Image: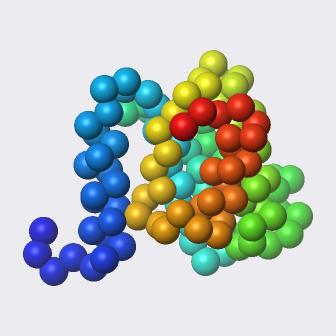
Amino acid sequence: MVNLNSKLKRKLRVRRSLKKNKDQRPRLSVFRSSKNIYAQIINDIEGKTVASASTLEKGQKKSSGADIKAAEEIGKLIADRAKEAGIDKVIFDRSGYLYHGRVKALADKARENGLQF
């Protein structure tokens, strides 16, 4: 792990702490690009994606995918899809992004709509 940039170091540090989890709950992973935001609920035991949502889906491209409003919509959508899949508790994986802005908005809206983490 020599010469890694700070974002990658944060990402690996967050992942390492998540792997120590004793509950083996699914992981809510967030990816944020400059134009869109994506969220996935991943079952690491089976290695499968249980639910996903992004601003690129049909019907989600109402406004820019790079704003807090879009992140809140994706947070609500991922929480609803998790309920449909029978998941109510997850571990939040911010993927090295700071817990601020769009990432925080997505997490807060997912909590409001029933996901626990």
Residue 68: name its quadrant: bottom right
Q: Is residue 50 above or below residue 52?
A: above
Relative to 76, residue 63 above or below = below
Q: Which percent across, then down, holds residue 94? A: 48, 56
Residue at (31, 77) in percent of width and height: 6
Question: Up-down: is 90 above or below 88?
Answer: below
Task: Pick the quarter of the image with the C terminus.
Answer: top right
Quarter of the rendering occupied by the N terminus: bottom left
How far from the left and from the top, in percent, is residue 78?
68, 41
Residue 61 quadrant: bottom right
Q: Residue at x 55, y 28 (%)?
A: 89
Q: Which residue is the extreme one toward the top?
A: 86
Residue 109 in view, yes or no: yes
Q: Is residue 92 left or right of residue 74?
A: left
Left or right: residue 82 versus residue 45 is right
Q: Nearer the viewer, residue 59 or 94?
A: 94
Residue at 28 percent across and 58 percent down: it is 13
Residue at the extreme left: 2
Residue 98 x %, y %: 49, 68
> As rendered, which of 23 and 35 lies closer to the eye?
23
Image spot of residue 59 (x, y percent):
86, 53
Please give the name of the residue rendered at 16% of the width and 80% of the height, measured from the top-left corner. 3
Foreground residue among 97 and 82: 97
Q: Which colour assignment does the render follow?
A: rainbow
Position of 61 with respect to 74 (left or right) is right
Labels in figure, total? 0
Whether residue 75 is visible, yes or no, is: no
Q: Quarter of the image holding residue 64?
A: bottom right
